[in-house]
Image (cartoon, helix red, strand yellow):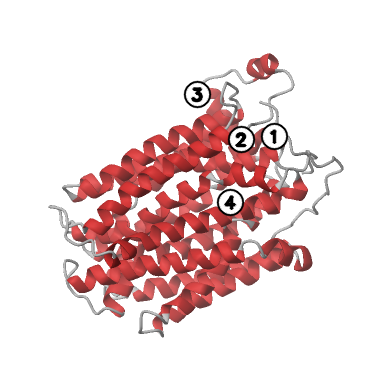
Amino acid sequence: MSTQKPTLGFWQIWNMSFGFLGIQFGWGLQLGNMSAIYEKLGASPAQIPALWLAAPMTGLLIQPVIGWMSDRTWGRLGRRRPYFLSGAILASSALFLMPRSSTLWMAAGLLWILDASINISMEPFRAFVADNLGDAQHNRGFVMQSFFIGVGAVLAGALPFVLRRLELTGEAANGIPNTVKYSFEIGAAAFLLAVLWTVISTSEYPPPDVEEFRRSRQGGPLRAVGDIVGAISGMPPTMRQLAIVQFFTWLGLYCMFLFFVPAVSRGVFHAVDPNSPEYTSGQEWGNVCFAIYNGVCFVVAFWIPRVARRFGRKRTHAFCLVCGGLGLVLVYVFKSPWQLAISMAGVGIAWASILSMPYAILASALPPEKIGIYMGIFNFFIVLPEITASLTFGPLIRYVFSNNPIYIVMLGGVLLMVASALMPLVVDEPVVESALPATQAAPVR
């Protein structure tokens, strides 16, 4: 669905995307450490998937509602900014408290709050870029988000390892290493400050008639339910096709997110006891691996628009998914820590595309007045794979894979290749170049 808006400059796109550095700092700490924290607090490998379940269940409800609300909001902070600022405050609080968890269920509850809060921030951020950029700049805008996601995740992944090399030792009373504890505290500050930068440095386009906009957006919970149900039933064809690709993509990614660190601890560092020094070393190296693939992501991110212009967004995304799939399958072969960098390079190429190409394709196919709600619904196909993983991976690893997490990681690689094979079925609308002149002025408040 074509839209024409003034072309924004590099630093304007930089500022509107900068908050994603903080959001991914929070995601990176969560994904790289929560399974290990659960094991430190007494969970078995088979229990870990279920302990992740509450968060995506909540996200399934929150995301379309937040999208619906942000479509209908206009105030002093604009349309999307009140939501990602509120989410940042809540998520930063949860990050600060997480390493202080005294019980397994306290950690699970804080993960529930953290995941929900990050989603409150993240989905309006996706809509924020689509709001402010014309079709011809969607690739650049979502790739800039990928860049900051890569930077934030590199910092989050490397931080515990760096703190260890700075000779920070010891652990809290609950057994969580001080390297992890201080990393979460630094992440809490980074999350809030990065989002604040975007809130302060950017503006949004107001409705042409604010009072008419508010009158037309009146309605309570029943209208919200009706609008969300109507949007789901009326999804554009491109969105339906992308949804299937997203489901298999993210199911593959959750294989990695949930089990890569335990797989490294057991398969490469030969740890048996989750409370052993070998396991802690494996946990820290697993975070370094996450930093490596995110480092590759932010390097590759700026090349993806050029590749997409030459070969098309569909082919580009399909190729990148194959790279990620091969990377995860090869984890089985590599037995030394540094060999895993080769696997993570493939995952990083896929990650750069996963964070940009589907959203760039989608944004061109959505009605502008419903971008928020559709971005929230699109996130169903990130959350539903997480729920599927939480419900099925426990029995799978226990009864099929003999509690060996490496096989789940390899399964993730296969699923990424399935997603790649589905990309030719997606219809990508051609990009309409903006006819409006470039401007260095920010959108009107």
Q: Which residue is mark 4?
A: 145
Q: Residue at x 33, y 64 (%)?
A: 162
Mark sitting earlier along the chain (4/2): 4
Mark 1 lies on a secondary structure that is loop
CB atoms at circles 4 and 1 under 8 Å apart?
Answer: no
User: What is the residue that sits farthest to the left in this orientation?
Assistant: 173
Q: Which residue is mark 2?
A: 202
Q: Residue at x 52, y 38 (%)?
A: 197
For residue 362, the mark is none
Q: Residue flagged by tag 3: what amino acid is it?
A: Pro
Q: Residue at x 36, y 56 (%)?
A: 390
For residue 221, the mark is 3
Residue 209 locus on image (x, y percent): 72, 18
CB atoms at circles 1 and 2 under 8 Å apart?
Answer: yes
Residue 364 locus on image (x, y percent): 73, 47
Check the picture and name the quadrant holding the C terminus. top right
Query: Which is more toward the observer, 425 or 343?
Result: 343
Q: CA distance from mark 3 to mark 1?
A: 34 Å
Q: Is residue 91 above or below residue 140?
A: above
Residue 220 locus on image (x, y percent): 52, 20
CB atoms at circles 3 and 2 under 8 Å apart?
Answer: no
Q: Which numbered disc, 3 or 1, marks the residue closer to the eye? A: 1
Q: Which residue is mark 1?
A: 442
